[in-house]
Amino acid sequence: MSGGFFGGFGGPGFGGPGFGGPGPAGGWAEKGWGQGGFGGGPGFKGGFGHGRRPFLKRAAFVTAALLLDGPADAAQIVQRVSDATEGAFTPPQDVAELAIGLLAGRGVVTVDNGVATLTELGRNLLAWRGVSSETAHAFLGRAAKFGDAFKIRRELFELAGLARTITWTGTDEQKQQLAETRTKVLEALTEAKKALHRVLGEG
């Protein structure tokens, strides 16, 4: 079964190098479900089945785990994640919907009017991986410790996206403003890095 539906998660629990992993821009990795993650310990690593969208496979696994708390639609899954992580993660609803669709296609959930319910297969697969409602919430709860880091990362990603847009499609005036802003931002980032290195050196 190691190469099957939950192939790649490796052992009980949720740890691993984090959940999210490298993902396409705009995916959960960039929208709050943790590229680089906050894992630790065995378990929550690798993919969810097979395919070319590992970020979605991981999102589907998280969604399945949260359905142990009871049936939910995509909006409720988003709220459960936000609550469990104290707001550190607020995944986009459209990706939650895709995750539910993936689960339904694999027989892990049934869907009625958008509300997903774990099947016996789904519960058995989660149990086989040692995942319970308690371990799921404990794993997600660790994200709260990284809230500030996620916010910084999210803002930097958005800033880079704006810069790319202006570089490719901006007017000459916009590009001039980008150049001026880039200088200020790089100076600020350099000072911030120096400050953080000083803090680490004092520890």
Image (spheres, rainbow, N blue to C red):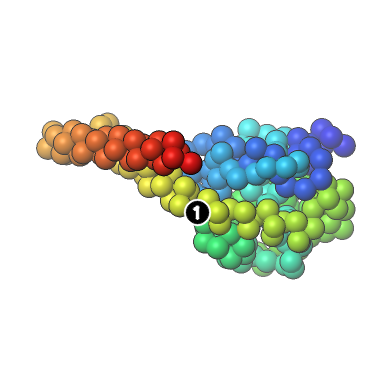
Outermost residue toward the front? 202
Look at 75% across and 56% down and name the residue there. 135
Asked if one can make out residue 6 in the rendered structure from this viewpoint, the answer is yes
Using the image as rendered, state which of residue 155 and residue 77 is in the foreground: 155
User: Which residue lies under the disc numbered 1?
Assistant: 147
Using the image as rendered, state which of residue 157 and residue 165 is in the foreground: 157
In the image, residue 121 lies at what x, y percent? 86, 53
Question: Helix, strand, or loop for circle 1?
Answer: helix
Q: Quadrant of residue 77?
A: bottom right
Look at 41% across and 47% down and name the residue there. 152
Direction from residue 175 to residue 70 in the image, left or right: right
Look at 87% across and 58% down and name the residue there. 120
Asked if one can make out residue 122 in the rendered structure from this viewpoint, the answer is no
Q: Is residue 159 above or below residue 172?
A: below
Could you classify mark 1 by the number of other residues whose Cα lies within 10 Å: few (under 14), some (14-19), or many (20 or more)?
A: some
In the image, residue 179 lies at what x, y percent? 18, 33
Q: Is residue 43 above or below residue 115?
A: above
Query: What's under tag 1, amino acid-wise?
Result: Gly
Using the image as rendered, state which of residue 28 and residue 133 is in the foreground: 133
Using the image as rendered, state which of residue 138 and residue 1 is in the foreground: 138
Look at 55% across and 40% down and name the residue there. 35
Direction from residue 138 to residue 90 in the image, left or right: left
Q: Quadrant of residue 163?
A: top left
* Quadrant in the picture for the N terminus: top right
In the image, residue 42 lies at what x, y percent? 76, 41
In the image, residue 56 lies at what x, y percent? 62, 44
Q: How many marks?
A: 1
Q: Quadrant of residue 202?
A: top left
